Image (cartoon, coloured by chain):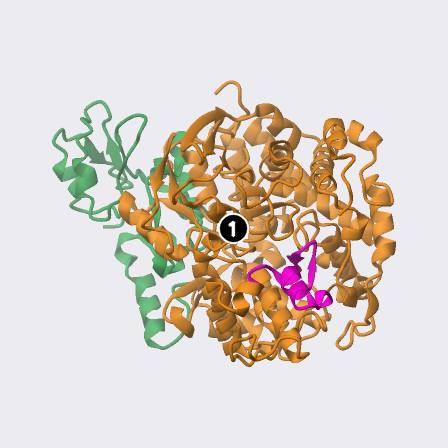
Chain colours: A green, B orange
Amino acid sequence: MKHKVLVVYAHKCTGCRICEQWCAQTHHGEMNPAKARLAVHRVHDRQINVPVTCSQCIKAPCIDVCPSQCISRNEDTFGLILDADECIACRMCVDSCVRGCIKMDADTEIPLLCDLCNGDPQCVKHCPEGALQYVPFDQVDRGFRQYHALRLAGEKGGAQ
Amino acid sequence: MSNTISGLTGSMLRVDLTGSRVERVETPRDLFERFIGARGVGAYMLFHELQRHTDPLGPAGKLIFLTSPLVGTMAPGANKITVSFRSPLSETYSFSLCGGHLAPELKFAGFDGIVVEGKSDRPVYLWVDNGTATLLDAGHLWGKQTHDTEDAIREELGDQEIRVASIGPAGEKLVRYACIQADYHREFGRGGGGAVMGSKNLKAVAVRGTGSVEVADSAALAEIAERVYADLAEHPKARLRRRFGTPEMVEGTNKFGFWATRNFTTGYFEKADRLTGPELKAKIFIGDNSCYSCPVACGKVSPVTRGQFAGKLIEGAEFETIGLLGPNCGVSDPEAVIAATAVCDAYGFDTMSAGAAISFAMEAYEQGVISREDTGGLDLRFGNGEALIAVAQKIADRDGLGDILAEGSRRAAGQFGVPHLAMQVKGQELATYEPRGVVGMGLSYAISPKGGHHMIAPTMGLEMAGDPANRLVGDGKARMVKDTQLIMTIVDSLAMCSSMRFVLGLEAILSLYRVVTGITLEQEEALLIAERIDNLERLFNVREGLTRKDDTLPRRFLKDAMPTGPSKGNTVPLDQMLDEYYELMGWDPEGVPRAERMRELGLQAEWEAAQGTPGR
């Protein structure tokens, strides 16, 4: 399993939402974070920003629950593909997503699914903090291990 | 959409609180052409919608919230919203800017701005939801602190992603420098907009938007944005700000002797070590926060360790806050500064004016003008961090001495018969730059249309460039102030963060404007617009009766030599700088814009309206 997936280091996110902007611009040519395939959720009282992205589940519930079987994935990148003509906008995929990352497009009335920008995810490319990474599946643990190891070592900072 | 400028939504809201009416109106395209946006358009609307001597806290007072074509787009740092109003603190023209995520949300909701007028007969809040707007009851929110208000509104509207701007108890109690708090820890900080909001019984504005902002050339905009990110990532000043936030300025400001200390009795704080950026980063800050579309993330998260907010978090403390609640009150303990900041944020009043009002009280206390009886038993000496926190709370509650300080330092000092101890211009408290140590900032404070303020023409960096000794002399400062002022007017009118100026020169700013609006604005033209805006702001104050005598500084900066520190011995040569500045602006020796230049700038009607005002 050598495909790459999105990895989120929430502790690095500052909440600038530049990722959302690039996603919406890349897919729609629009200035509208509501059309991004990811979102930064701010927990206000704790001053924490959590990027919510597609995690490219292997047994993806969004694919499995779709009653019209209109969600598939790109064999090379694992990015999601929607057959918009078949989509009935039932929102089962929205409900099923374990991360809560799927939105509905208000204009086209279809779900916004992460296609990984054909293997060059723009959110990752433009994150100024390195909070989003595009990592081979067999290495997703490493950044987190470093982060927690450093914390255990009583040091400040995180995954570099 | 055809009749608007790209980047704008084409719609605004007009909220009449007296009649409980909310109306959708067309965004005035011509005003955005003549005045760019935000600050500029606000200045025009305020001038024309208010009469001379309008009571800022009466029903005729207004709050005009405005964004710009750039807000909500990928333009880096274009995340501000302005509010324009006549200040209850300075009784001059005023505006205040707020970052965070409120401004883009309003654009996504389909509105370029909101004009609030009249007075509601009961507490209400405005709910702006994707092209609609309603006034909702806020009786149950009245009395709540700002963060609790935000939480309650998000809870009752059932959406944690709604953006909220609100006032706290200080705004309700008309503390004259009450702020409007948004996104928890971003503020329309200065001038008392929160008191204006409180006077109208408007508790909050909540916004949700999921629409698009249409721009002329989104691909070109993305390309410029990418370049700006790269430039910011490399720029030394931006890198400092990324790491340490605005407190990166502490060391330089103090080292060169212009950090206001103990109510501006000197410009050097001998115990600054605990308050530097690196020190705060190592011992206090636990996280970083960004405003929308900004890669600098200068917001620093700090835990509160004392007082009623112990265990909570604040964003900050910012450089100005640290300066005015810290050294200017003689306090070197960052945890005391943070605890006092938490009080200001939760109750909703300006940390800067609060710090300066408290430092005034401390000096008056040490001089025996304010007694221990007046303070309610507090030993209000410089350096007493616990007293600092306690007095901040008294201001929030308008309790005892706090009730007097809530009126601002000019009124408070007047009441105690020591007006010279109030460190203010036109009634608004000064920022943390001690003007004897950086004299261009003295001119900047004096000519600021909103009273003592540092961001009208922040020349401190320029005054240090080359030879730092240049900061102590008046030569060339009028030109420097004017040039800086014009650029800042453009930046504010585009609703961009001033931090962008480290890497974005005027040319780059105007290229952003071009790809968003499709309108090519040449540099000369943009500078002319800026001059138009600055003169319009000036005419507002002339109409109120302000002249040269009001463009002055507290006596000590003009008469008393700086007593200690690296700027020892210096005073501010204000008259010389003021003469030159008026000349450069085309104003007469009394500081009144001349008719001919006003005609050239297209401000003849406003000039005429400002004539014949009896001086104060």
Residue carrying label 1: B195
Q: Which segment did they paint magenta?
A: B405-429
Residue at 31% across, 69% down: A148
On the image, which quarter does residue A96 sit in? top left
User: Dot 1 lies on which element?
Assistant: helix
Give the image location of residue A28, x and y in percent: 39, 30
Is residue A72 depicted above or below A99 in this figure? above
Residue B276 lies left or right of residue A104; in this view the side is right
What chain does mark 1 sit on? B
Is residue B470 depicted above or below B190 in this figure? below
Residue at 84% across, 54% down: B577
**Towards the viewer: B497 or B560:** B560
The amino acid type found where label 1 is placed reads Ala
Give the image location of residue B552, x and y in percent: 77, 56
Give the image location of residue B514, x and y in percent: 60, 30
On the image, which quarter does residue B332 sit in? bottom right
Residue at 49% across, 39% down: B74
Give the image location of residue B189, x and y in percent: 54, 53
Evaluate whether residue B220 shows in this view: yes
